Image (cartoon, rainbow, N blue to C red):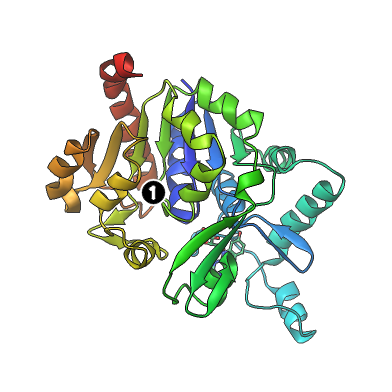
């Protein structure tokens, strides 16, 4: 059984963690967003890849979901004292990841291979696949102008209204062979509950990738990141609303209509199930909030079981 999971930030990493613990080693591949990567203090930071990597390694900070558990902030404080950029909270051990990544990239190693090296070093028995090796940067149009993603998200606490989203460099981005192979090999493809616009959105925007997913033989199943029209973490609901999308689980279904065979929705949204089914996808109604590791594992196992049930019915359609 080969499982491919598309995952962005903290919510996506939680479900990826549940899948990782529910499957035999090396059965899972995680396809990660690199469009919120940026350079700080001369270091290449890959927040979404790292959030997944630390979660799978069992090292993630349980309070924030990003960064490392038990990390310290000595370097950050020292940088601030020296007048450097201090708004993005890089912990001391986390900085080691960015130094190592930057060092290997500077030697000419592609991000795909760098990420694999880091995951192996942390003992992770799955592949974490960057969506591309090329530079892609999310930029957000706001009343304050066009902002680099982390300026919008962390520095300004995603308070600005969003008038547009751009993935600078996307037109030249190439889908790595590792990703194409993982899509072709997958027995099921999951879209984790990540922001559809700035976490899953950039992955689907890499030229050719959305089409590869659409043509995959495996069932494709997403978990809605909205519950009762609210994002548990981050600005997905406000962003959707600002950009004219319906900020509900039905709105999520509409964003992915061409891609999905099934959508997992929270019990709170059960009344939306008929309208979602009318879009041509199956619906599983269950508890989708992942408070703890037991919740992640339970949701992952329910999804794996549901995908087994869906596969025979979908086979003739794929
Ligand atoms: N998110 C924050 O809200 N504030 C931070 O200071 C912050 C630091 C940080 C450091 C390393 C890392 O890997 C992630 C970090 N994040 C931080 C999370 C991250 O920037 C966002 O959650 C994602 O980019 C959105 O998916």
Q: Nearer the viewer, residue 83 or 259?
A: 259
SS class of the residue under badge 1? loop
Q: Check mark 1 vs ligand 1: CB closer than 8 Å? yes or no.
A: no
Does the rendering let one see residue 25?
Answer: no
Image location of residue 91, percent across then percent down:
67, 67
Does the rendering let one see residue 123?
Answer: yes
Q: Nearer the viewer, residue 165 or 116?
A: 165
Task: Give the side of residue 188 with respect to residue 226, left or right.
Answer: right
Image location of residue 148, percent across then percent down:
60, 67
Residue at image position (42%, 51%) is: 194
Q: Nearer the viewer, residue 158 or 2?
A: 158
User: Which residue carries the number 1 mark?
Assistant: 193
Image location of residue 74, percent across then percent down:
73, 75
Q: Is residue 86 above or below residue 249?
A: below
Residue at image position (65%, 43%) is: 173
Ligand 1 falls in quadrant: bottom right
Residue at image position (25%, 34%) is: 281
Tell me which corner region of the image, top left, top right, bottom left or bottom right, holds residue 313: top left
Question: Which image quarter is the C terminus in?
Answer: top left
Task: Give the side of residue 244 with respect to residue 165, left or right.
Answer: left
Residue at image position (22%, 59%) is: 228
Q: Is residue 29 above or below residue 50?
A: above
Q: Is residue 65 above or below residue 218?
A: below
Q: Residue furthest right?
A: 107
**Are there few (<14), some (14-19), or many (20+) residues within 10 Å of tag 1?**
many
Task: Give the side of residue 259 with respect to residue 109, left or right.
Answer: left
């Amino acid at each position: 059984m080969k499982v491919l999971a598309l995952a962005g930030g903290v919510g996506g990493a939680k479900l990826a963690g549940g899948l990782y613990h529910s499957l035999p080693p090396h059965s899972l591949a995680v396809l990660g967003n690199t469009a919120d990567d940026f350079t700080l203090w001369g270091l290449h930071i890959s927040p979404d890849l790292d959030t997944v990597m630390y979660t799978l390694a069992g090292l993630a900070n349980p309070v924030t979901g990003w960064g490392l558990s038990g990390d310290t902030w000595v370097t950050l404080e020292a940088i601030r004292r020296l007048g450097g950029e201090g708004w993005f909270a890089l912990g001391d051990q986390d900085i080691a990841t960015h130094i190592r990544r930057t060092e290997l990239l500077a030697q000419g190693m592609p991000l795909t291979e760098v990420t694999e090296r880091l995951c192996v070093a942390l003992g992770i028995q799955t592949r974490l696949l960057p969506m591309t090796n090329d530079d892609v940067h999310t930029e957000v149009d706001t009343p304050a102008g066009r902002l680099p993603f982390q300026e919008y998200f962390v520095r300004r606490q995603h308070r600005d209204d969003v008038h547009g989203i751009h993935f600078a460099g996307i037109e030249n981005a190439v889908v790595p062979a590792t990703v194409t192979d993982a899509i072709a090999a997958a027995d099921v493809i999951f879209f984790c509950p990540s922001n559809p616009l700035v976490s899953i959105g950039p992955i689907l925007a890499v030229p050719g990738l959305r089409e590869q997913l659409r043509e995959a033989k495996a069932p494709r199943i997403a978990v809605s990141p909205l519950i009762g029209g609210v994002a548990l973490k981050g600005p997905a609901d406000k962003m959707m609303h600002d950009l004219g999308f319906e900020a509900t689980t039905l709105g999520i279904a509409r964003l992915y209509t061409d891609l999905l065979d099934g959508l997992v929705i929270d019990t709170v949204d059960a009344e939306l199930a008929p309208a979602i089914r009318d879009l041509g996808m199956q619906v599983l109604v269950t508890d989708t909030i992942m408070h703890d590791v037991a919740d992640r594992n339970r949701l992952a196992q329910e999804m794996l079981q549901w995908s087994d049930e869906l596969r025979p019915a979908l086979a003739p359609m794929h």
